[in-house]
Amino acid sequence: MSRLRALPRAHLIAGLCLVALLLYPVVNPWQPYPQGVMLLAFLLAIQASSWNIVSGYAGYISLGHSMFLGLGSYTVGVLAVRFGVNPLWVAPLGGVTAVIIAVLIGSVVLRTRGHAFVIITIAMLLAAQIFAVNLKSITQGSDGITLELPFWDRDFQNIPFYYVYLILLVLTVLFSAWIRRTKFGTGLVAIREDEGKAASIGVNTTRFKIVAYAASSFFIGMAGGVYAYYLTFINPVGSFAILGSVTIVLATLTGGRGTLYGPVIGAFIVQVVSEAATVYGGGSQSRVLLFGLALMVVVLFLPKGLLPTIEAWWRRRHPEKVEYTDQAGALNRAPATTTERVRAELAAVNAEDAIAPGEILLDVRGVSKRFGGLTAVDNAGLTVRKGTITALIGPNGSGKTTLFNLISGGMAADSGEIWFDGRRIDGMRPWRRGHLGLGRTYQVTRLFKEMTVQENVVAPLPDSRWRTMFSDAVGGHEAARARELLDIVGLGRFANQPAGALSYGQQKLVELAQVLMLEPKLILLDEPAGGVNPSLLGQLTEVIRELNRSGVTFLIVEHNIPLVLDLCDPVVVFSHGAPIAEGPPERIRTDPLVLDAYLGDDWRPAEDGTADEGAGESDRAETATREAVQ
Amino acid sequence: MTHLVQAIALGLLIGGVYALMASGLTLIFGVMRIINIAQGAFLILVAMLTWWLWHETGIDPILLSVVTTPLMFGFGWVAYRLLLSRIRGSSASMSVLLTFGFALVIEGVLNITAGNKFKSATPSYFEESFRVGAISLPKAQVFGFLAAMAVLAALYFVLTRTWTGRAIRAATQNPSGAALVGVGATGTAALAFAIGSATTGVGGSILSVLYPFFPASHYDWISRLLGIVVLGGMGSLPGALVGAGILGLAETLTATYGSLNWSTLVFYIVIMVVLLIRPQGLFGAKLREDTV
């Protein structure tokens, strides 16, 4: 919100700085030293901005990013010497090499979540150095490669390099800004915030991370190619230096990880300070110590970086009035036309299906899941018919949420099969299930709290096409659709608020809007009424009913029994990891087995007339389910 | 054939030392989800200290670990209390960056105080070997291996047989559950970090005899150790043992049948192949990813 509103001002300042930098060599042409410092600052800023794509947006720290600079240098150095071409012409090939290597490494390491990536990046930097030392026939080993001197007159000094780097820097920043505007960029931030949730809303996390890693390498590789020409000499130790990686990390962290201009600002600060330290502070010997101390100080005392810290300070000084808890606003009904359009869309999605209403949409067959000695889901069977609002009730710890996780793909089942819409899905990654039209919400809401409400709703991807991935997330069709969905759940006016600022009940509604972005056929709702106040609850049930009329099927886990009995049909009762009864609400509320296992005596009818009928059939869980299905 | 047996024997001896060095790293990760990038720098710090003590007093370098181990225990405890405990609760990447900065500070300080030259402790048995049939085993390697195994056995005993160890393992498996039964998270974490650091007290002393080192050597060491931990499965102690054995064998076999220059690279290739087949590493458990 205020970040967005501040954006034009930030762009204006950036533009002015750019003009000043463009004019600098013209105004002050005979000072090679400051120009040299600036030029290296540009180089560092290119690297920091690129690093920010994978480590800032997506949150996957790479400690070996200077490897791409070395790869670019060597690609260009080798080509230039072998074929006698000018290094500037082949510099883009340095970027291509970097991208190829990034994709190769990424495809191996980025398939899982977690910490292997950061470790492998360090190892790969050192491995690249070993290659450069030992592949003597190509790289000339430790002797290094000497390139030709620049073709221009010495009077021009390094001014051409200055402009080449400045242009590359502008391109890098534009590239980074463009990525952040696309659904790809939103997906990367989603991965940083909550990778499991991101996968459940159709974000192909593996592909996103690999593409981000590759995208973060291209301009560094190209800059490396130019760097080889600038230095006219490259060797393994200089090209694959870990200290280079440190400066990249330090620069981005100082300026503000995950922001657009932070890495650039940080790069200028780090370059100038390190230059000053070299001149006044005992030479390059002390650089390691200085960088180490700086890194520790930044992590401990300025973890968010300068730009976000200043922004937060500014916001505290100039508070905006926001009506976070305005219930009337939250309950504003959407314009009828919007609702109609979305309903028609959902109806179309659900009508083109081969499965007719009343047939089985979701079929869980004999699924089990164990955690050590605890069997959370025990050979459970469950069917959800198209067009129904099916309820799943049962005591805490009976395995309902685990079953949800198995269906949505957050966990893998130990045994059994899950079929959805005529396809077996239990082996599929979560995002594939999302693309098929399976959406879910969480018991404790899992919104991306650092994003705005609208960004949260834009983030889901209904299919796996590259076009969808690179479509505009800020303006255009996707954003408009997100606004419509927010209107449907009555939260349109909160679109630009940070998601973390909403009340719990409102967050539940946003999560529902998020799922609708997937164009779902089946929505799994995990305790939609938990922690929601009565007026919002009315809103919620009405939205569910309306969506159901458009053809969307629901499977709902809920403890609010009056709500379940009012809204859902059929009702499935879970106990000890498997269903014990299934049927229409009126039958479930009087089933003695259900009364014993879950509902309790409060729900027991005064005269026990209907109980006999249920007792025999519910003897064993499986028979009960089968009978109920028939 | 003799070559092969010799290479395997040497590989296992080296692997034992690697296992000790990696055990601290994997222990710290297992308990706190902290990747201690400074572990390599701790090793070099100890190696430097051992070298200096050996140089001044002539006491056997490996024996000096009796001095360096408690020192590193205290060092680790203080480092956790002063530095790492401050960023508890923030993302794991911050701990990577903090310990990385710490590693650079140690390197920088060593650069200034001890100078930027290769060092190596050379006790009297440095050039001698045990001969078993046709193969010869350098005495330094054998002593290093024995010391490493002794410490690993002690570590295993502490972790499985003492209250402290059970507390650490409980905190590894379920921090909030451990807190409920009276195992304080911060205290346990500091203890685990201290124990993890203490393993470098022995590891670094052995290193000072077996390998020449200088302040910037810690990059080579940390990337090797991290490689072992990733290969074995992050946080798994048996995994670290097996990973270390594989690294030792990969290095000696490559050096025997190929060239010494490529030996580290072969290990990285092994890691990539393993990760291709088993993304969580050899002994890594797939974490329960989707709670709530």
Image: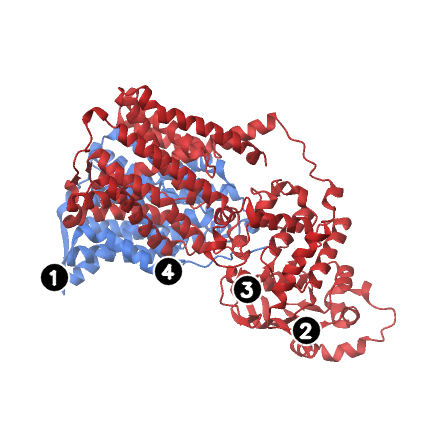
- State yes or no: discs 1 and 3 in contact (Cβ < 8 Å): no
What amino acid is at disc 2? Gly
Per the model, the C-alpha gap separating discs 4 and 2 is: 47 Å
Camera-side residue of B277 and A554: A554
Under circle 4, the secondary element is: loop
Identify the image quadrant of residue A451.
top right
Which residue is situated farthest in the right direction here?
Answer: A607
| Residue denoted by label 1 | B134
Judging by the rendered image, the residue that carries numbered circle 4 is: B282
| Front in this rendered view, residue A109 or A436 | A436
Which quarter of the rendered picture does the N terminus of chain A lie within? top right
Q: Dot 3 corresponds to which residue?
A: A436
Distance, label 1 to label 2, CA atoms, is 79 Å
Q: 10 Å neighbourhood of mark 2: few (<14), some, or many (≥20)?
A: few
Decide if residue A177 is on the left or right side of residue A455.
left
Contact (Cβ within 8 Å) of mark 4 with mark 1: no
Residue B209 at least partly seen? yes
Q: Which chain is red?
A: A
Q: Which chain is blue?
A: B
- Would you name the residue on which mark 2 appears? A358
- CB under 8 Å between callouts 1 and 2? no
Query: Residue A34's mark?
Result: none
Asked if A54 appears above or below A35 in the picture, the reply is below
Residue A208 in the image, given as x and y percentages of width and height: 45, 52
Q: Residues within 10 Å of mark 1 (few under 14, many from 20)?
A: few
Disc 4 marks a residue whose amino acid type is: Leu
Residue at x 13%, y 63% (from the top left corner): B2
Pick the residue in front: A333 or A299. Answer: A333
Position of B173 with respect to B226 (left or right) is right
